[in-house]
Image: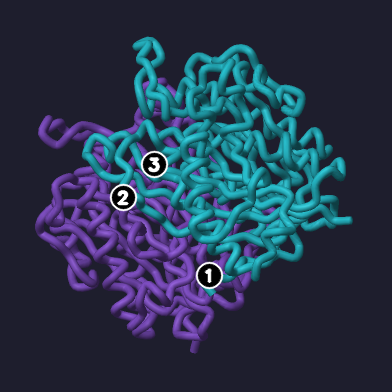
Chain colours: A cyan, B purple
Amino acid sequence: MRDALLEFSKTFLKAECSTVGKKEYEGPLSDYFDSWEKDEYFGCRSFDEAESEMSRRNINFLLSKARYSYGDIDVICGGDLLNQCVATSFAASGTGIPYFGLYGACSTIAEAFICSALFIETGGAHNAVGFASSHFCSAERQYRFPLEYGSTRTPTAQNTVTGSGAYLFTSDRCGVRVKNALIGRIIDKEITDANNMGAAMAGAAADTVLRYRAASKDEMDSFDYIITGDLGREGHEIAAELLRRQGFTAGSRFVDCGMLIYDAEKQDVHSGGSGAGCMSSVLGAYFISRMRRGEIKRILAVGTGALLNPNSVLQKKTIPAVAHAVCFERED
Amino acid sequence: MRDALLEFSKTFLKAECSTVGKKEYEGPLSDYFDSWEKDEYFGCRSFDEAESEMSRRNINFLLSKARYSYGDIDVICGGDLLNQCVATSFAASGTGIPYFGLYGACSTIAEAFICSALFIETGGAHNAVGFASSHFCSAERQYRFPLEYGSTRTPTAQNTVTGSGAYLFTSDRCGVRVKNALIGRIIDKEITDANNMGAAMAGAAADTVLRYRAASKDEMDSFDYIITGDLGREGHEIAAELLRRQGFTAGSRFVDCGMLIYDAEKQDVHSGGSGAGCMSSVLGAYFISRMRRGEIKRILAVGTGALLNPNSVLQKKTIPAVAHAVCFERED
């Protein structure tokens, strides 16, 4: 059972919304995001508050797209990368919606999809919101250096996405359904370089894709895309190679949100985008919207997370990683 | 639906296990804990590693109590108070069990109960482990000051429990069942004193108990105990008063794990115990074991969490809080 898919039958995705920062808006997916903000403070006094404000706005926008109010939502679940997930708690505080906190590093949005589905499948919710965020400035201060230091970055480093993605799931039949999911195992490839998190997460992504392939009895060909969260260029190459060695190639159908969100050449982002806001903003804005327009039918979203903290790196610990897979499918 | 109980019908608690530190073992519940360790490093090089090691040992002990191995467990879910929940990820890493990370501050164990039940109810797991931990030394360094500073504590301050509690849930009918649960809303009483987290959490605890009372159509009299996680003496008094004003008194049936774990007089713990390890170690060791012996029949466990981080306090933000309720019942 641990290697079986979680099968869902009642969970549908009613709406999705993505709010991003200036750099993300200036990237190749510019036309797809629902809203963006040029002020990195989002009108607040600190970067922590800015991240909360971004998520709050994005959740409000999501609900207004669906013509719902806070009172219609039975549970909200999500998380972020800040210590003790404060961006999320302050965003959810004041909504009055029952709140379920998650932490899976950059895989948090996949946890939020799964958790929302579990609430809906058990009848615990008619409507559930799942969301996750990250903010370049708050993440730099927390994980690396305050921006004022002006430190340089290694070639394998990724750029934390300023972005928030929110998703409204419902038990009412509608366009896109959540078909099934697979919870990932923690994979530790003994990477210790916090500037190469793509490599740390690649093993977990490959493990989850291979377990999904086994559990789904080779349904892999039916996916228009197999989408990882934020492996970046480095991690994506490693994951593709690991999969190839196990006899699985998806070619151009195997894509990474961290590679799509920026123009690597023009935007000086080294290995690509990362962060809990990466897949959460890109998946809905770019892939689900194309699914709604009938361009694609079925995707596998593989949220990837590196389970480190700055202390664990200084203590010379390895970087364990996890990846969860969720299948979205268009209803015809 | 948002104010309705999540009803469970297939989730049973097969075994529980608590491992604590020296101070907790020297307290009034000494006889109840499954194991304890006098070395605050648990044989490791850092307090972070110590917390992971405590959880790892405790999970292994849980499984050996039930004669299960890692391979029998379909999913493990949990969290802790360290930045990015590293104690939990390093404890779960190496088990090979699919891992679902949670963060609800000190209410994390209640989230772990609920999440385990959701996996079992949907058929996503036969066997699920939920766990949470905290460690006095790692928490002091992270939230307050490194122990070496020898800073004094305010009278309302609580003592973070060194403890880990792990629970094995199963779909096989057995002694104790998880009957239902209620997800809490974030309540912000605008407390800004991080040394008075009991007061910050009291409003959330009272809100959840009152919502549970309304949803359960006044089943409250049937509970042998209504147990909060870690309000401490100060928070417990406030919560009791808030409940009294709404016409609900549970008298001596309303208890707090943070007040039970230490001898406040002799152990110099000011307002009592706190931390994600508080309810998680006390609930199983003291209450569930008494339930298994037939001394009590039905309890409501209200996990309480303060959703702050050290930065948010320095930024003069308030301390929002959340509480989730879970009903455990003995099968006759």
The residue that disc 1 covers is A3
Q: Residue at x 39, y 35 (%)?
A: A196
Cα–Cα span, label 2 and label 3 = 9 Å
Secondary structure at numbered mark 3? helix
The residue that disc 3 covers is B84
Relative image position of residue A217 (x, y in whole percent): 65, 70
Residue type of the residue flagged with mark 1: Asp
Q: Is residue B219 left or right of residue A64?
A: left
Secondary structure at numbered mark 1? loop
Image mark 1: chain: A
Image mark 2: chain: B
The residue sitting at the right extreme is A332
- Picture quarter with the N terminus of chain A: bottom right
Residue B87, which numbered label?
A: 2
Relative image position of residue B317 (x, y in whole percent): 45, 25
Relative image position of residue A198 (x, y in whole percent): 45, 39
Q: Residues within 10 Å of mark 1 (few under 14, many from 20)?
A: many
Query: Exactly how many numbered labels are in the figure?
Result: 3
Residue type of the residue flagged with mark 2: Ala
Q: Residue at x 38, y 85 (%)?
A: B294
